[in-house]
């Protein structure tokens, strides 16, 4: 039992995109939020090492040392909007130790240090909330932690990096190359100056770890994710996939079965009729398969100042309601009490079973396809669909596109190595996983 | 402050589709739910006037008088799975008065008597939860009440009756007539024996009232909804809509603007590229436009024993977490405290502005279209798209399909009456509203 508060005081550290968006959303909706929270919610202190010209702070006190906010006895909730896992971690720890509740949008921090930080929060009797850390404004954390609590979750699959989805959408719609679209995304402010986190799947991996932890009741397991980015995709592959009735999306997939848990981020062919196949541009969506409810899907803006602030403020309103009533809601940070978290066993990637898309360049003469088919067959892999293109004028090589049936990755790799060794096949074979995403 | 509970005892009244589904979900997931709730959750008492052969109750005590459950001092949470607004209302009132928390899936009851029931619950210091009342297993109540709390909601639009959506999907995919598909839906158990609630939009109206109440912070306003069903739709209209790039869906639409609030349920043309246009069969989806987050969408099974039980059990897990900790979470039933609810003013249907789809049967001779255009023009209505079909052999009349620009319904009706009075026009004009659903 804590004291009932008449006004809940917020400290915001970091006044960049999301911090600035949160500041202005709290200012603009003061009355609405007071009605919803049942108490007034005030920004009492901002920590920012420099001003943000797009976010004037008026007469709100601003400290250049962000740690001053963690030390401010008047601040009840510290909102960490710095990013990264070094200073942000120190700041969050300082706030929790000082008995402040913390709200963050920092997926890297939660995925990498969540296990320790939730324990620290519990030790100090305060809350650490992170709705904004995954899929921006979509309330997916609350859906998994509370709304789907009656289900055993079998799997989930999400488009959880807006920049990557923007790039793939542009490549498909306009047949443009990866590098060119990446430059545009940077110019539009979607991608970071260093885009590695987005395009190599690291950002999506952080988010997937958080989703999987909630879905399966396991600790954050950042070392267990396989991450493959979108840098090797070509407009040709996107086009061939489309001819076969698929779209290529960069998915985070978490699955739980008797074999163990799979956590993987990679480009994926999905049937074009699926809703996920029609999530375009910077939008995100997460499809969750629960045993009772079946598939449910959550769609919306996965990034941007205001959408992300929407999720940050949802956490703030929850906390304000609780602080006004004098008691935190007893919802565990990861949906189950820490001692009830399961020790996960993970499936190694070579044992993961999916259908595959393969693109090979073959000599255009009889017998080649039967060699390919028989090398796949030796590994127990059969063919679901195949396109063989006519050779261009004067060309003797043709692109051959194969969709296999479900195959163990290890077996597929053995077959691919054998096919690449054929004298009739040129270069390496492009491969992309396929997911049917049916319930 | 209430006593902390070691085990939370559930009483289920009504053992039909949803009651039976809830009973078995609670049994099957005993361990999982105990981990999530942090306490054991037990069905202690069932009230059912007869056995349900599909849901054996084992050694759980069963009373034939459902009110015995409301009187059972060992029951902490009564789950009302009866339906309707008479006996169900008495039961819920009896339970609340007896100091029991109540969980229900009964949208008719919440829409019609929610204002009184929430007040009664508050008076007795107990909770009344209703996640399952709208859109089955989709956690849309929680999303609006908590996940989007940082937003002013501008509008929402939902496919919120699975039976209706199943019928429209079949009509479109197979060109079948309404009556025929309705019979199949009844045979499949989707539609009630008396299908009026589904096909006349009454069920959707109840759900829309609940969604609007949460979105806009207003009391339940069941008298303010306009409801039009799907009984007059023809496969031809669905086909013409498709030629023009639209799909016809039965939508519940709630909008808030400076003019007031609109609450309406009706068939609607929506652009085929929208995610809602691709929600098929018995699935539901709700699209919500918030000022900060932009559009978000929630998709899943809107009915059925297990999906609906998923939502019922989510409410039970929330309550069990709270009861185990000894205090209810201070989230108001409608997202704001009762005294903060706004007195809504509603827009009358004649003032509602939307584009329209019109289908007329006209004589195939010069000048007819210009008469139609000028009668629309007199009301300030312009034409966005038009298809004029060639006459069948031996026919002198042709179908003409018009999509208008946005028009006041009153003006549209005046123009339509004038057009119907033309000697060159046969019969009445079919009309369906259009919504672009963009943010
Ligand atoms: N942007 C999105 O759409 C989005 C969506 C979801 C989640 N997030 C997460 O939200 C967090 C913030 O992201 P953002 O996009 O708002 O980043 P941003 O625009 O770069 O803002 C970060 C802010 O933190 C300040 N900062 C960084 N390191 C600091 C330090 N050591 N000491 C003091 N101040 C420091 C920066 O100050 P300077 O300007 O002086 O460097 C800047 O004002 C990250 O965890 C990110 O992953 C972002
Ligand atoms: N079905 C769905 O997919 C769905 C989805 C969302 C919400 N809901 C809501 O869930 C509630 C239950 O629906 P349902 O589909 O489960 O209906 P149902 O299958 O008809 O079950 C209703 C149960 O209540 C019993 N009952 C009805 N009136 C009673 C009375 N006066 N006294 C004692 N028992 C009575 C019935 O007993 P008898 O068998 O003896 O008549 C039956 O067992 C309704 O409010 C409905 O709107 C249903």
Image (cartoon, coloured by chain):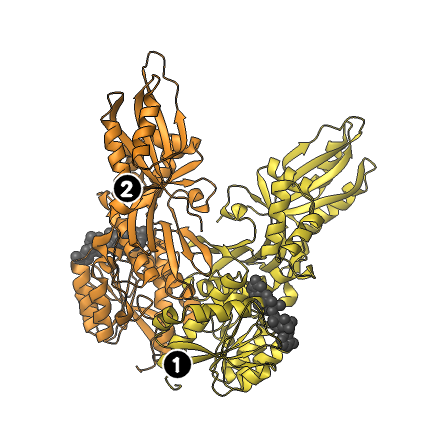
Chain colours: A orange, B yellow
Residue B245 place in picture, x, y as percent: 57, 38
Element under disc 1:
strand
**x, y (%) of residue A217?**
31, 64
Which quadrant of the view contains residue A260? bottom left
Give how far apart the Cα atoms at labels 2 and 1 are: 46 Å
For residue A409, the mark is 2
For the point 21% across and 43% down, the residue is A194
- Image check: B427 left or right of B126? right
Residue B355 seen anywhere in this rendered image of the structure? no
Residue placed most toward the observer, A277 or B391: A277
Is A428 left or right of A251, judged from the image as shown?
left
In the rendered image, which residue does mark 1 sit on?
Answer: B7
**Residue B72 on image: x %, y %:** 52, 86
* Residue drawn at (34%, 55%) of the image: A257
Mark 2 residue crowding within 10 angstroms, few (<14) / some (14–19) / many (20+) = some
Q: Nearer the viewer, residue B89 or A137?
A: B89
Q: Chain of mark 1?
A: B
């Amino acid at each position: 039992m804590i004291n009932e508060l008449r006004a809940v005081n917020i400290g915001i550290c970091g006044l960049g995109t999301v911090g600035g968006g949160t500041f202005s959303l709290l200012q603009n909706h003061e009355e609405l939020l007071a009605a919803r929270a049942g108490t007034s919610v005030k920004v009492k202190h901002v920590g920012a090492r420099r001003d943000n010209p797009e976010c004037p702070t008026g007469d709100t006190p601003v400290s250049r040392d962000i740690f001053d906010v963690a030390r401010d006895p008047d601040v009840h909730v510290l909102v960490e909007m710095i990013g990264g896992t070094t200073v942000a971690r120190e700041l969050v720890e300082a706030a929790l130790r000082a008995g402040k509740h913390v709200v963050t949008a920092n997926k890297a921090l939660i995925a990498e240090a969540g296990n320790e930080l939730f324990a620290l929060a519990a030790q100090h009797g305060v809350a650490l909330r992170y709705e904004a850390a995954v899929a921006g404004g979509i309330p997916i954390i609350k859906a998994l932690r509370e709304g789907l609590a009656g289900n055993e979750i079998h799997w989930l699959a999400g488009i959880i990096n807006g920049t990557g989805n923007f790039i793939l959408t542009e490549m498909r719609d306009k047949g443009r190359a990866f590098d060119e679209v990446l430059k545009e995304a940077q110019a539009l402010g979607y991608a970071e100056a260093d885009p590695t986190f987005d395009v190599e799947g690291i950002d999506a991996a952080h988010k997937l770890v958080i989703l999987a932890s909630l879905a399966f009741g396991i600790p954050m397991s950042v070392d267990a994710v396989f991450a493959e980015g979108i840098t090797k995709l070509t407009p040709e592959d996107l086009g061939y996939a489309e001819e076969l009735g698929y779209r290529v999306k960069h998915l985070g997939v978490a699955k739980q079965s008797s074999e163990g848990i799979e956590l993987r981020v990679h480009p994926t062919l999905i049937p074009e009729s699926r809703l996920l196949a029609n999530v375009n541009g910077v939008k995100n969506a997460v499809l969750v398969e629960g045993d009772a409810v079946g598939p449910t899907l959550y769609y919306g803006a996965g990034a941007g100042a205001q959408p992300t602030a929407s999720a940050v403020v949802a956490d703030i309103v929850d906390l304000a309601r609780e602080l006004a009533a004098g008691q935190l809601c007893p919802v565990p940070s990861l949906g189950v009490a820490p001692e009830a978290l399961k020790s996960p066993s993970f499936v190694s990637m070579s044992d993961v079973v999916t259908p595959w898309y393969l693109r090979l360049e073959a000599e255009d003469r009889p017998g080649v396809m039967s060699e390919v088919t028989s090398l796949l067959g030796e590994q127990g892999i059969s063919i679901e669909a195949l396109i063989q293109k006519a050779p261009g004028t004067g060309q003797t090589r043709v692109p051959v596109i194969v969709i296999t049936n479900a195959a163990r990755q290890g077996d597929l790799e053995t077959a691919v190595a054998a096919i690449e060794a054929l004298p009739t096949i040129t270069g390496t074979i492009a491969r992309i996983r396929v997911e049917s995403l049916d319930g």
